Image: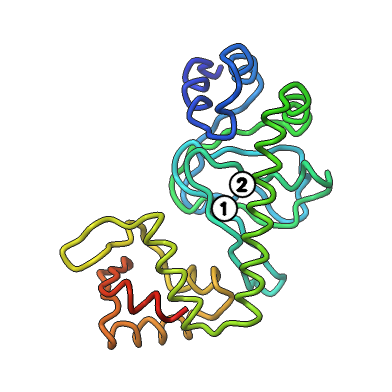
Amino acid sequence: MQDTRRILWYLKKITLLADLGPEALARLAEKVEMREVRRRDVVYLPGDPGTAVYFVNGGRVKVSKVTRDGKALTLNYCGPGELFGEVCLVDGGPRGEMAESIENSMITQLERGDFERLLGNHPSLGLAMTRLLCTRRRELENKIEALVFRDVTSKLAELLIQLAGEYGVDDSRGTLLALKITHQELANLIGSTRETVSLTLSQFKKRKLICTEGRKVIISDTESLRALF
């Protein structure tokens, strides 16, 4: 049996649900399923039925497009308080993307029908969902534009600055990206190859724009890096 009070505590921290009153949240807590997923666990695969939406309560989930020959393009990372799997609300079809936990994580699952009823009963939630979908559409358009028109140096520089804004912490050497991310994961985010990303990072290091510590990156010269895109 799930701990409803614990679930309710987590639901209150989800930005999208901020305008729901305590009664609505209490009813919602009885409908959702919360579970832990370990690093590298797959939440769903392309072709799986799109029967639920998910919230990240802790950890991080990667959403990506994967080809049959194993190539991947990362669409976005979802952290605490964020929604993923929302495309099923639009078309009701099977999944077109893959969702995978890249850290030990806690997620909440809500059946599609229950979420649709929630949207119908709370217009403010519907407006918030519309804004979220528009934001993600804009982000996807920007990603497509970058893939088509920009080179790897520009895309990787912008990605590092973006990650610094989300995960950066002050460090005596500059801005430390407080997440472990492989060269392959960086490549998947910008539609490149691991080899090209590794070479470009080496060039950034030679120019003293960044330095590295294991799998962590420290941005040493933010303004020069920003000038590359």
In the image, farthest residue toward the left: 172
Q: What residue type is labelled 2?
A: Val
Coordinates of residue 193 in the picture (x, y in percent) = 53, 81
Task: Please tell me which residue is depicted at 31% across the width and 68% down the height of the picture.
Answer: 217
Q: Label 1 vs label 2: CA separation?
A: 6 Å
Q: In this view, does 130 lie above or below 217?
A: above
Q: Name the residue under label 1.
A: 100
The circle on residue 43 is 2
The circle on residue 80 is none
* Residue 20 found in image quarter: top right
Task: Please tell me which residue is depicted at 56% across the width and 79% down the height of the picture.
Answer: 192
Q: Is the residue under label 2 in contact with that under label 1 (CB below 8 Å)?
A: yes
Q: Pointer 1: residues within 10 angstroms few (<14), some, or many (20+)?
A: many
Coordinates of residue 41 in the picture (x, y in percent) = 54, 49
Quadrant in which the N terminus is drawn: top right
Q: Is residue 154 above or below residue 125?
A: below
Apparent side of residue 193 relative to residue 138 in the rendered image (left or right):
left
Coordinates of residue 12 in the picture (x, y in percent) = 50, 25
Say which of 50 and 121 sits in front. Answer: 121
Label 1 SS: strand
Q: What residue type is labelled 1?
A: Glu
Label 2 SS: strand
Task: Please tell me which residue is depicted at 74% across the width and 26% down the height of the picture.
Answer: 114
Task: Please tell me which residue is depicted at 50% across the width and 17% down the height of the picture.
Answer: 3
Sequence-wise, which precedes: disc 1 or disc 2? Answer: 2
